[in-house]
Amino acid sequence: MKRKIEHILILAGLFLAPACGGGKEKCQLTPAEGSLAGYYQVTVTCPDRSFSSTQVPSVRFGENFAVKIQVIDSHAISATVQGVPEPGKVDVSIDTDGSEQILKAAFTYLPAADPVFDRMFAIGASWTMGVQSGSFSPEGQLNGPAAQFARRVGAYFPLPLVKFAVPAPVQVADLIGHCSPEDLVNIKLGGIEEVVSYVSRQNEISLAVIREDPDIQVQNLAIGGAKIHDVIYGGGAMKRIDIAFLENLVYFPRAPLAKIFVTPEVGSQLDLVEAGHPTLVMITDLFANDLAPAVFKDGLADPALATPLDSFRDDTRTLLSRLSATGAEVFVGNLGHPITLPWLKEKIKVLEHEGHIQEIDKMMAEIETMVEQYTGIFAEEASPYSNIHIVDLASAFAEIDGNGLLVGSETLTTRMFGGLISLDGIHPSRTGYALYANLFLESVNTVRGLDLPLVDLAPVLADDPLSPSAIQAAGLDPDLCQ
């Protein structure tokens, strides 16, 4: 009987021993807990396991794979977690060539700051996407306004993280002696050509090879260049191949290469949000691209190129009705005057130099009228819905455009190289996006009666490669275009 009990205890010991470390020393996770938002590094140290840089393991925290796995030394690896939908303890799986070790309940995901963040989604265009300096990049994605917002409140918010910038971003060196980059339309088309060329050289001929984790169900669904109509129906509905291409890259990356210029079968941004049963939807730039073709073009603005007002009203009505029906709290940024952007400021200087003084006055009046018409229609259509909230981005940026913004010891401006706008003169910098995140946080606090702390802009600016001091250190005078 004694021998039988000993056998039982030995077997129990085998099953209860730590999965990593052979029962001698447990693997240690640093940190051992963190936010549902993810996108921070966790170090896994296993004294009794040997890691090799030639056989980098796959690592999974709960249901989602970690990305950017790095072998630190023979006993430690680092992994960037992507969060999970629900708080609590999760298993950590380490797999090397089919040999899997599981660390039971080794990591704890903490709950979000409020139940309203349980299922957070974002839709819209390039600002919500996190585009910076004419590029869709990992740096921009991780520091876009919705991503910074999600990290601040601890919300699960999986991103369509890419492995490299598409296309390569504008660099400080490109702008020495200039105040604005080349035509952004050419930059965008160049990015598509670059991606197709890269994909065609890989073993798997799909956009999945560009994504860090092509199978994660993303919740930042924003698509650069999208108009309201595209958000509702998808880019393929209007034969906008650039929009359809990004839609596939963002939420259907395993589409065959022959179909990457057609809106995915999974639907549009709005379709996917509805299917996700959101509790909160964030939109920073819903109708900027309805106006953009009229303004961001060669020469004088042309109102005829903007979305017709009747079409804009119909699409706005459809979108807001369907968003409201989800029951989510929907926070939508309004449209500021494009004059707050360096691109238009520099364009006006060129037009003045060419002698178009009277035409400039007429152009600015036309732009102001278009902004007023769009924002007026949007406010009218939003007013019946108690869960649609307009975030006044326009007033905030108009104030900063006039007086600047003091962050630490630096006064930031909306001018070129002023610290709030990236090097394409249109999309915000990391610090600019943090400011946008705070404007949405303030609105959520008001609506929900919360007192959530805002993003601290000082450390964001200190690490921002596009701060005035960083630009100067890179060899360009920040006052060049003031």
Image (cartoon, rainbow, N blue to C red):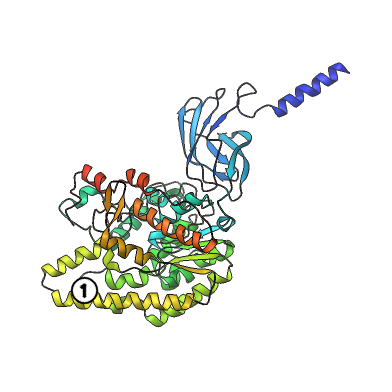
The quarter of the image holding the C terminus is bottom left
| Residue at the spot of label 1 | 300
Image height of 93 relative to 112, above or below: above
340 vs 480, left or right, is right
> From this viewpoint, is residue 256 visible?
no
Q: Residue furthest bottom?
A: 310
Closer to the camera, 48 or 128?
Answer: 128
Q: Residue furthest right?
A: 1
> From this viewpoint, is residue 349 visible?
yes
320 vs 327, left or right, is left
> Residue at point 61% right, 47% down?
87
Query: Of helix, strand and loop, which one carries label 1?
Result: loop
Image height of 153 relative to 247, above or below: above
Image height of 219 relative to 73, above or below: below
Three-letter amino acid code of the residue under disc 1: Leu
Residue 74 locus on image (x, y percent)? 48, 25
Quarter of the figure with residue 427: bottom left
Residue 4 locus on image (x, y percent)? 85, 20
Residue 452 locus on image (x, y percent)? 50, 53
Quarter of the figure with residue 96: top right
Residue 477 locus on image (x, y percent)? 18, 49
> Residue at point 38% right, 81% down?
309
28 vs 439, left or right, is right
